[in-house]
Image (tube, rainbow, N blue to C red):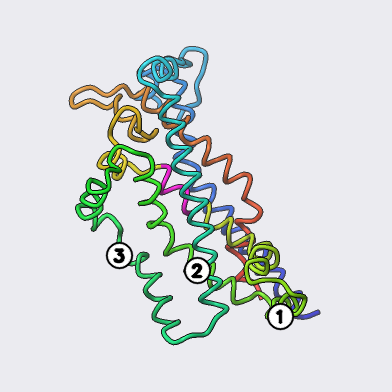
Amino acid sequence: MAQARTSLPRTIAAHAVLIAYTLIALFPVFVILINSVKSRRAIFAHPLALPGPQSFDLIGFTTVLHQGDFLRYFENSMIVTVSSLALVLLFGAMAAFALSEYRFRGNTLMGLYLALGIMIPIRLGTVAILQMMVAGGLVNTLLALILVYTAQGLPLAVFILSEFMKTVSADLKNAGRIDGLSEYRIFFRLVLPLVRPAMATVAVFSMIPIWNDLWFPLILAPSEATKTLTLGSQVFIGQFVTNWNAVLASLSLAILPVLVLYLIFSRQLIRGITAGAVK
């Protein structure tokens, strides 16, 4: 009883801190959204004011939908992001399960090697990556971006999921083996449902860098047919003149999928983040 009373304030404090960080993180999003439906003069005169009858203007969204192929950019971003996340979660969970379940020589070194990508940014190998894509004929293809983002997200996925895999009951897995389940069925039917909060956490934190990335789309897939949403938004940014209404409108539309994903996985995300904070 005393332990339950002690853990309750910690749980409340953890949720309060997470909510406070969420509000701070969402404030720039709020500023972008309110300025995307205001006139250019109102954006610079009163950037923090809510749109009113005199400042309300949808010229930014009109420009975005009529200039450039915004729907194609959006579709490319969705294909790249969803495909990359699926591969990151699948291969990351499989690698984490192998590292946490099976004991073999070099297990620790293999885990450190897979987690090395967290400390070494993948952008340091941009030249080598571009050379490989050119040699493989993958330049200006969405597959090139999917492969790069999968490699980028795997280290964090393996690092997070391996810790959660260790908490899964060994008796449950041994019971499955006694019942004749294969290792694949144990992984997909017994282990994955129990680490769903960790999977949601990895999905959210992996999606944002992929969706917002400008570097690799600019280098590996800059053609009109393979532009992502972030790269396509750069058409409104000029050397001397920037169409801020269109930029803010495109950013507002780009934010929506991230917000939807966060709302869908928010419960699992909070459980995944606070799982190690409460005993």
Q: Earlier in the sequence, mark 2 or mark 3?
A: 2
The residue pinned by badge 1 equals: 174
The residue pinned by badge 2 equals: 95
Question: At 35% from the left edge and 70% from the top edge, which residue is drawn?
Answer: 116
Where does the C terminus fall, quadrant-wise? Answer: bottom right
Q: Distance between the residues labelled 1 and 2?
A: 19 Å
* Label 2: few (<14), some (14–19) or many (≥20) C-alpha neighbours in 10 Å: many
* Label 1: few (<14), some (14–19) or many (≥20) C-alpha neighbours in 10 Å: few
Q: Which residue lies furthest to the right in this view?
A: 1
Amino acid type, label 3: Ile
Q: Please tell me whether mark 3 sits on a helix, a strand or a loop.
A: loop
Amino acid type, label 2: Ala
Q: Distance between the residues labelled 1 and 3?
A: 37 Å
Determine whether label 2 and label 3 are within 8 Å by CB.
no
Which numbered disc, 2 or 3, marks the residue closer to the eye? Answer: 2
Whole-percent x, y for residue 84 in the image: 46, 49
Question: At 37% from the left edge and 65% from the top edge, which residue is drawn?
Answer: 118
Q: Is residue 49 above or below residue 266?
A: above
The residue pinned by badge 3 equals: 120
Q: Nearer the viewer, residue 79 or 247?
A: 79
Q: Is residue 234 above or below residue 89?
A: above
